[in-house]
Image (spheres, rainbow, N blue to C red):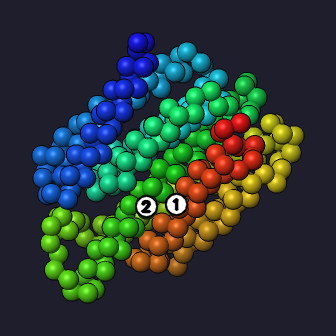
Amino acid sequence: MELYDVLQIGITVLYTFGAVLFIGGMLGMRPGLKTAAGLSSGAGFALHTLSLALYFKLMGYGSFLEGDFHLSLLGWVLLAIFFALWWRLKLDFLALAASPLALLLYLSSMSVPGTKVLMPKALAGSFFMLHIGSLFFSLAFLAMAFAAGALFMHLERKIKTKEKLVGFRKDLPSLNTFDHANHLAVVFGFPLYTVGLLSGFIWARFAWGRIVTGDPKEIVSLAIWVVYAYLFHQRLAMGWRGRKAAMLAMAVFAFCVFSLVVVNFMVPSHHNFMQ
């Protein structure tokens, strides 16, 4: 068994423990379990970083043409955003989304080895940072917005119905904290999504000879951008807060997941990872 295989097993085990322990710690109000979850996810993240570095060392910029590398890196970016928010703002509840999603993405990357992404190899490095890199960070922020929005709506419903907060709900942050996390995720996520989309059109010019090709991924991505832009505008210009902003952020994330899972794996497209 080679080092890369050992790393895959270690990452899978540590991420699984991290996801399960955090959910158990959250629901059972066991701070010790949440601490253990953080340590397990952190160790998995370190191994994941080493794994990506080894992959890049072996494949060079050609790594950016591999579908499994993309999915693995998306999981890594998701956890990197989560750890940053946890460290700066103490938003540990976001692990409810970050840990399972990172595990799912990593497992998905292991199921699609050898899939290719079309792009001139010589441009893979620079365009990767602009296109895929910015979109991945945007998706990671949206995942955080989804988790914050879902918990905001859950807690708000309990408060409005004057239902007594029991169990893990007693330890949840305030509605303002959830709304603030959702706000930050949208404010940082939308500009990154825009950069990713624009650089994608440049990518299309090099890869397929046209800026707009009518590919299903382009159409879905533009539709998502319109909804995302509306949310961004309403948040910043119109002062949207609370339920409406939370619901729309959750919808944008759901559209992105649909785009990633359905378009990239099930629909004939330039961006299909199964080609």
In the rendered image, which quarter contains the C terminus?
top right
What amino acid is at disc 1?
Answer: Phe
Residue occupying image coordinates x 61% and y 41%? 132
| Depth check, front residue: 122 or 18 | 18
Where does the image place residue 221, in percent across and percent down from the top left? 67, 57
Q: CA distance from mark 1 to mark 2?
A: 8 Å
- Residue that lies at the very extreme toward the top in this rendered image: 1
Q: Is residue 174 left or right of residue 97?
A: left
Sequence-first disc among 1 and 2? 2
State the mark number for residue 145.
2
Give whichever of 235, 163 is nearer the camera: 163
Taking the spot 36% from the left edge, 30% from the top edge, the residue there is 11
Counting other residues with Cα less than 10 Å from the Cα at mark 1, is it few (<14), some (14-19), or many (20 or more)?
Answer: many
In the rendered image, which quarter is residue 273 located in?
top right
Farthest residue, direction bottom: 161
Q: Position of residue 261 (x, y in %)?
A: 58, 50
User: Which residue occupies the foreground of this view, 207 or 115?
Assistant: 115
- Name the element at disc 1: helix
Label 2, secondary structure: give it: helix
Is residue 10 at least partly visible in the picture?
yes
Disc 2 packing (10 Å; few <14; some 14–19; many ≥20): many
Q: Which residue is mark 1?
A: 253
